[in-house]
Every structure is written in C-alpha cells, then in structure tokens.
Image (cartoon, grey):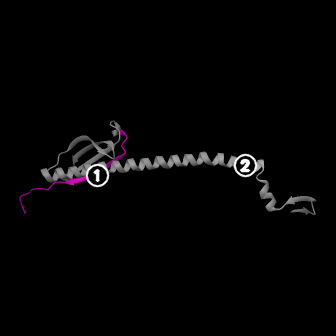
C-alpha cells in the first residue's frame, strides 16, 4: 500500500492507510484553535439575538398598553361626549408585568380636537426613558344646533 515518489525518493501512504492512522497533533491543535475562536463569537451573537428579542417583546407590550389607553380615551369620549385636557398617569398589568403610563391631553387650534400623548415604560420612574410613545388625536362632536 505504499508508493514511492520517484522524483523525491519519499514513501507515502495511500488514503485508506492514512485514515487508519488518525489525526496528527498539529491537526488537532488547529481544530481546537478554530473552535476556541468560533465558540465565543457564537455565544456573543446568540446573546445579542436574545437581547434583541427581549427588546422587541417589551416594545410590543408597551405599544399594546398605549393602544389600550387610547381606546379607553375613545370610550370616555363616547360615554361623556367630551374630553378634558390635562395630565393623567396609571399602571396596567400585561403579560405578567406592570407597565406604567403617562397621558397628557391638550386641545389643538381646532376647537373640540384634542391631541393625546401616551408614554409607556416598564419602570415607575421611567417617564424620562420610555419604551414607547404614542400620539393620538380625538375629536368630540360639536353641537351647533343646526342639523
């Protein structure tokens, strides 16, 4: 199973014989070096992916809380027929967590047309660094007597 290289005078083993011999120490060391470099990079990438997923989940929940608050304002408008400007804050439970929201309403230049800004955070003092901010506009019906 050996052949001699006539030009160099060297003897080499065939592939079948070489497979029975196993890996050399250099080959094993190179393989370990590649694994040692690749594993930490893989772990960092995986960690970043999990952080991104957590952020998207938090942002989605904060959007739902803000949308719920705007829906509540619409219901108040429907029940009372009027809106008030001012600042309100509260807490909502969603997905097993407490979410803190701040809502500020102001009348616009158009009479009966209100702008509401709803800020949502997962921290009680998190108004300075909100996860989501929603701006919504609501109009109350004007009763002008002419129909």
Quarter of the image where the N terminus is located: bottom right
State the residue at coordinates (44%, 50%).
Answer: 53
Determine whether the residue tagged by mark 2 lies in a helix, strand or loop: helix
Q: Position of residue 93 (x, y in %)?
A: 29, 44
Q: Position of residue 142 (x, y in %)?
A: 12, 56
In the drawing, does residue 147 fall left or right of residue 110? left
Q: Position of residue 7 (x, y in %)?
A: 93, 62
Q: Which mark is residue 30?
A: 2
Single out the mark in the foreground, 1 or 2. 2
Determine whether the residue tagged by mark 1 lies in a helix, strand or loop: helix
- Calculate the distance from the C-alpha at mark 1 to the C-alpha at mark 2: 56 Å
Q: Is residue 130 magenta?
A: yes
State the residue at coordinates (36%, 43%).
Answer: 130
State the residue at coordinates (28%, 51%).
Answer: 67
- Residue linked to disc 1: 67
Relative depth, front residue between 57 and 70 = 57
In the drawing, does residue 72 fall left or right of residue 57? left
Q: What is the magenta range?
A: 128-147
Quadrant of the rendered image containing residue 144: bottom left
């Amino acid at each position: 199973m050996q052949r001699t290289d006539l030009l160099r005078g060297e003897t080499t083993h065939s592939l079948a014989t070489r497979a029975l011999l196993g890996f050399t120490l250099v080959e094993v060391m190179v393989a370990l070096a590649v694994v040692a470099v690749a594993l930490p990079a893989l772990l960092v990438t995986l960690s970043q992916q999990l952080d991104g997923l957590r952020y998207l989940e938090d942002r989605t929940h904060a959007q739902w809380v803000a949308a719920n608050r705007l829906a509540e304002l619409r219901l108040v408008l429907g029940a009372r027929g009027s809106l008030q400007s001012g600042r309100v804050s509260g807490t909502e439970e969603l997905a097993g967590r407490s979410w803190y929201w701040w809502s500020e309403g102001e009348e616009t230049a158009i009479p009966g047309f209100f702008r509401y800004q709803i800020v949502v955070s997962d921290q009680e003092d998190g108004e300075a660094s909100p996860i989501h901010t929603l701006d919504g506009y609501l109009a109350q019906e004007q009763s002008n007597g002419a129909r």
